[in-house]
Amino acid sequence: MTCTKEQIRKFMKYRKTLSLEVAAAKAGMSENTARRYSKMGGKCLPKPDRDYRTRNDPFAVVWEQLDDMLKADAGLEAKTLLEWLQEAYPGQFKQSHLRTLQRVPTKQSSFLRTSALACRVKVTTPGATS
């Protein structure tokens, strides 16, 4: 039951004037799938959230070292970290890994900012007077 939004839109348009079988054929989907979308009123199913990685982590071996380096100097850029990795582990890390590495310090710094703010935020109960 995987159809594009365009197929569903076409099916619902054709379904107004044509039979289910013909509308499904014109939209390029099976009758069973068309029947399901017809029962749902043409709404798309939301994709379930992924809780798994789609690729192996190229930095799994060195995360602790990178974490220590970032804790020592939070101003390090991903490009600098990648250059260090390429010198320390020749042939293991490519220039194409740069974007992956750029996401990590941002996530880490935002996590640190969030946890620091959480320590300063005063929790209040609605309706309670202080």
Image (cartoon, helix red, strand yellow):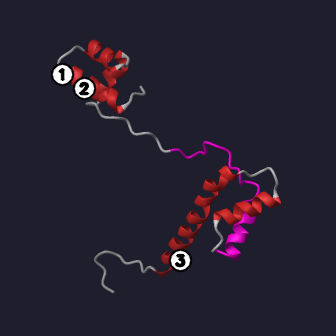
Q: Which residues are magenta?
A: 50-74
CA separation in Å, label 2 and label 3: 51 Å
In-front residue for pair 20/125: 20
Q: Is residue 119 left or right of residue 16?
A: right
Splitting the image into 4 quarters, where does residue 72 fall?
Answer: bottom right
Splitting the image into 4 quarters, where does residue 73 fall?
Answer: bottom right
- Tell me, yes or no, whether the two marked residues, 1 and 2, touch with CB atoms within 8 Å: yes
In-front residue for pair 8/102: 102
- Tell me, yes or no, whether the two marked residues, 2 and 3, touch with CB atoms within 8 Å: no
Residue 4 badge: none
Q: What residue type is disc 3 on?
A: Ala
Can you identify the residue that label 2 sits on? 12
Splitting the image into 4 quarters, where does residue 59 fall?
Answer: bottom right
Can you identify the residue that label 3 sits on? 116
Whether residue 32 is in magenta: the answer is no
Disc 3 is placed on an element classified as helix
Can you identify the residue that label 1 sits on? 16
In-front residue for pair 97/4: 97
Disc 1 is placed on an element classified as loop
Q: Report the residue that reaches farthest toward the left.
A: 17
Quick one: quadrant of the C terminus? bottom left
